[in-house]
Amino acid sequence: MSNKKVILGVAAGVAALAVVGIILKRKGYLDGIIEQAEGYGEEIADKYQSAKETARKKFDEVVQKGTEIADKIKSGESPSTAINNAAAPKNTATV
């Protein structure tokens, strides 16, 4: 197949899609689709923001625990004890 035929075929396809798009736009079919797409976009943005905040909190927790372990090791505590103490859940509930 020659390059000329490929270019003509692609151009014809683009022209056909443009005509279909214009017709759909005039009849109002695309309005509902655009609104749905905007809604989905907002929903995805909210989920991304939530995941980003969760990741940031987890990262900060890991950095804090790492800092605590490093400080304990610097103060003379054995590394295994410092790691075990940092890994143990802290009971913040009061009775």
Image (spheres, rainbow, N blue to C red):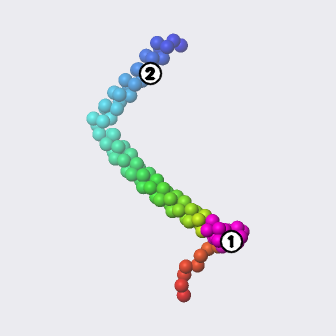
Where disc 1 sits, the SS reads loop
Q: Position of residue 79 (x, y in %)?
A: 70, 67
Cα distance in 3D space between marks 1 and 2: 73 Å
Q: Position of residue 4 (x, y in %)?
A: 46, 12
Q: Nearer the viewer, residue 21 or 41?
A: 41
Tell us which disc is closer to us: 1 or 2.
1
Where disc 2 sits, the SS reads helix
Which residue is the extreme one toward the left? 26
Q: Is residue 17 visible?
A: yes
Badge 2 density bin: few <14, some 14–19, many ≥20, Cα 10 Å: few
Q: Which amino acid, by three-letter code, is at mark 2?
A: Val
Main SS category, magenta section? helix
Find disc 2 in the rendering and name its residue. Answer: 10
Describe residue 15's horizontal placement relative to residue 89 as left or right: left
Q: In terms of sequence position, does the residue under pointer 1 or pointer 2 come before the other?
A: 2
Describe residue 92's horizontal placement relative to residue 82 as left or right: left
Q: Which amino acid, by three-letter code, is at mark 1?
A: Gly
Find disc 1 in the rendering and name its residue. Answer: 76
